[in-house]
Image: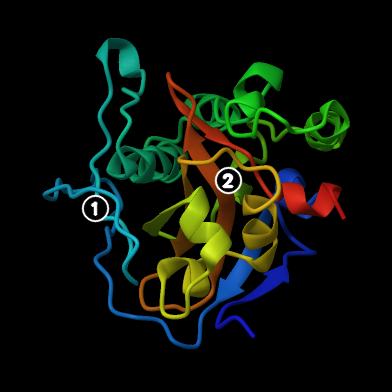
Amino acid sequence: MKAMKTVVLTTCALLLIGMGLGALTTRPDRVAAQSVKIEPGKKPTPKPATGASTSRKPIANGTPRAAAGGRFRYLNRPENLKALFETIHHLIYVKKDARSALALFVSMLPNEARARKALRNDTPPETLQKILDMYRRLESPTEANVDRLAKSEQTTVKVYGATTEEIAMNAQGSVVFSEFPGGAVKVAGQILRPGMTFYEVELLEPGKEYGMKYHLFFWDGKQWTMLGPVWRELQ
């Protein structure tokens, strides 16, 4: 049995999460990891960035980077995905800018063209349609409830990455074994595009083992896209 348990959040949750995009997680065999703490009134402190790794520790700390006008600067690096969630949290709880936080989160939701980039070329059209239907059924968050994306105390962001092949292998002791849900392992061998890297993003309170996890992020060529728990639509 996988070392990680996933418990679906059913109450007091973001509408998106309540529909199945996020989950509370716990890992009995957690390992020490670097983290970023966002203190009230302060932006995350820059840390040296490192590349993706499939060892049992999360991606190194990232730093939010915004272009002129406050727009987030998207880069094809895992620490940039980490910084994106740190920025969303900072906008919600420090800057009190719900509109910008909402825009950043919604920017990660897929359309047909973006979803296709994460799927094998031979993926049946009906499978893609089921994935898109999952998002059509969701009631998007609003400026009034965007704070449900993460609790104010969940100031630690961790990102875990692995290739399609590594996810499908699910080797014992790997980051996949400890951090990726079983559903992700299943779809990796069925529909995920070979050679791509996918990421799990987890938001935690410092020192806590339970947090909010979002599933299967990938770089679509221009920005980050969340494929989400698509296995639930393919059962």
Instruction: Name the residue: 52% across, 42% down.
Output: 217
Depth check, mark 1 against mark 2: the one in front is 1
In the figure, is residue 125 to the left or right of 25? right
Residue 166 shows up from this direction: yes
User: Horizontally, is 46 left or right of 65 in the view?
Assistant: left
Question: Could you tell me if residue 201 is visible in this image?
Answer: no
Q: Amino acid at mark 2?
A: Asp
Q: Which mark is residue 61?
A: 1
User: How far apart in space, not on screen, are marks 1 and 2 (Cα)?
Assistant: 22 Å
Circle 2 Cα neighbour tier, 10 Å, few/some/many (<14 / 14–19 / ≥20)? many
Q: As rendered, which of 137 and 4 lies closer to the eye?
A: 4
Relative to 80, residue 205 above or below: below
Q: Quadrant of the N terminus?
A: bottom right
Q: Position of residue 23 (x, y in %)?
A: 66, 62
Q: Are marks 1 and 2 in contact (CB under 8 Å)?
A: no
* Amino acid bearing label 1: Asn
The picture places residue 25, in percent across and down from the top left corner, at 59, 71
How many residues crowd mark 1 within 10 Å: few (<14), some (14–19), many (20+)?
many
Q: Which residue is mark 2?
A: 147
Taking depth in this image into account, of 211 and 6 the one nearest to the observer is 6
Looking at the image, is 83 positioned above or below residue 219? Answer: below
- Residue plotted at (36% across, 71% down): 206
Rendered residue at 31%/38% (across/down) = 80
> Eyeballing the image, is 153 above or below 194?
below
